[in-house]
């Protein structure tokens, strides 16, 4: 959508990778921090609930009307570089697709970003949920993150104020919206970068590439794999309505044909129950929810 645009009664179906769900009261794509703050103020004054949309790659949107406004970070996609003391500092807007960060690393010979291979979404979403692969993420590269609170107040968080945990927000009380972040990168041989990208790409081979999914549905429990537990419980190819557990990887749910959000949610609950009944483990969601479930 265009920078600064605001669309009333907007369908979110084509804006999430499951390609399901309903409409929201309005969808806006602020091009600046001040525009985003104004939208937050408008929503607060009208008692309108707010959600933030990045790449739409790990969310489940309720069916019907989502009685809320949605702020898209798509227009906040700036990227600037500067060198200082032998390091390269990349300042990225929250809406910048992570694939562009990876392309930058390959083009400029910058290390530390190969883990982004095969990860969808935006910089803001990746930071908010500490996305990563094989124990690597943005966390050790972050110098600061700028945010807006639920009251529209801006703040810059230094690296020593952030508390990174597995697939979780680095804040005890998360802000509403990440606006930008600064990453400290270093030069690396391109041959090494290519080798690392291939390594992380290999890790994705068992995933259902090309299917309508939202990535891993559940977080890995400590010392184990959610996919393994789900597989051991016979969850592969379980289905509810148009939703099914991927036959390739049990921690992925596919919109196999006209799935409603309710179908996907009910299938996640069925999977959780099977794992709990078999192993006594409660799987926690990695996906985020827009609306009431």
Image: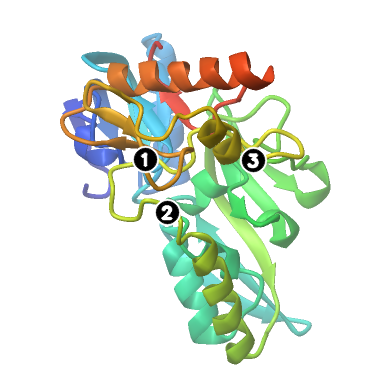
The reply to whether the C-beta atoms of the residues labelled 1 and 2 are less than 8 Å apart is no
| SS at badge 3 | loop
| Mark 2 vs 3, N-terminal side | 2
In the displayed structure image, the side of residue 30 where residue 166 appears, left or right: right
The spot of residue 163 in percent (x, y) is: 78, 40
The spot of residue 173 in percent (x, y) is: 68, 24
The spot of residue 146 in percent (x, y) is: 61, 46
| Mark 1 vs 2, N-terminal side | 2
In the displayed structure image, the side of residue 263 where residue 215 appears, left or right: right
- Where residue 40 is drawn, which disc sits there? none
Alpha carbons under labels 2 and 3: distance apart: 21 Å
Which residue is labeled 3 in the image?
225
Residue 276 or 255: which is nearer the viewer? 276
Residue at x-position 70% and y-position 57%: 142
Alpha carbons under labels 1 and 2: distance apart: 18 Å
Residue 190 or 104: which is nearer the viewer? 190
| Mark 3 vs 1, N-terminal side | 3
Which residue is labeled 1 in the image?
246
Alpha carbons under labels 3 and 1: distance apart: 16 Å
- Where residue 120 is drawn, which disc sits there? 2
Residue at x-position 43% and y-position 38%: 58
Residue at x-position 28% and y-position 54%: 210
Mark closer to the observer (1, 2)? 1
Q: How crowded is mark 1: few (under 14 residues within 10 Å), some or many (20 or more)?
A: many
């Amino acid at each position: 959508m265009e920078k600064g645009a605001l669309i009333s009664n907007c369908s979110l179906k084509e804006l999430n990778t499951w390609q399901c769900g309903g409409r929201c009261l309005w969808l806006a794509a602020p091009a600046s921090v001040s525009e985003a703050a104004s939208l937050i103020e408008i929503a607060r004054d009208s008692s309108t609930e707010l959600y933030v949309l990045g790449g739409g790659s790990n969310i489940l949107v309720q069916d019907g009307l989502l009685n809320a406004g949605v702020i898209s970070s798509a227009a906040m996609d700036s990227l600037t570089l500067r060198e200082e003391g032998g390091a390269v500092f990349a300042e990225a807007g929250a809406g910048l697709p992570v694939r562009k960060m990876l392309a930058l690393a390959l083009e400029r010979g910058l290390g530390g970003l190969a883990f982004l291979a095969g990860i969808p979404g935006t910089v803001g979403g990746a930071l908010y949920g500490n996305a990563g692969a094989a124990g690597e993420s943005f966390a050790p590269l972050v110098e600061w993150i700028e945010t807006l609170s639920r009251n529209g107040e801006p703040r810059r968080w230094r690296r020593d104020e952030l508390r990174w945990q597995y697939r979780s927000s680095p804040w005890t009380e998360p802000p509403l919206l990440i606006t930008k972040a600064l990453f400290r990168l270093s030069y690396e041989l391109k041959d090494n970068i290519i080798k690392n990208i291939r390594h992380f790409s290999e890790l994705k081979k068992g995933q259902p590439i090309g299917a309508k999914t939202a990535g891993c549905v559940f977080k890995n429990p400590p010392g184990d794999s959610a996919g393994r537990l789900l597989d051991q419980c016979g969850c592969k190819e379980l289905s509810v309505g148009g939703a099914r557990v991927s036959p390739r990887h049990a921690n992925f749910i596919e919109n196999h044909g006209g799935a409603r959000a309710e179908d996907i949610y009910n299938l996640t609950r069925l999977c959780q129950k099977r794992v709990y009944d078999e192993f006594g483990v409660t799987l926690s969601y990695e996906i985020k929810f827009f609306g009431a479930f």
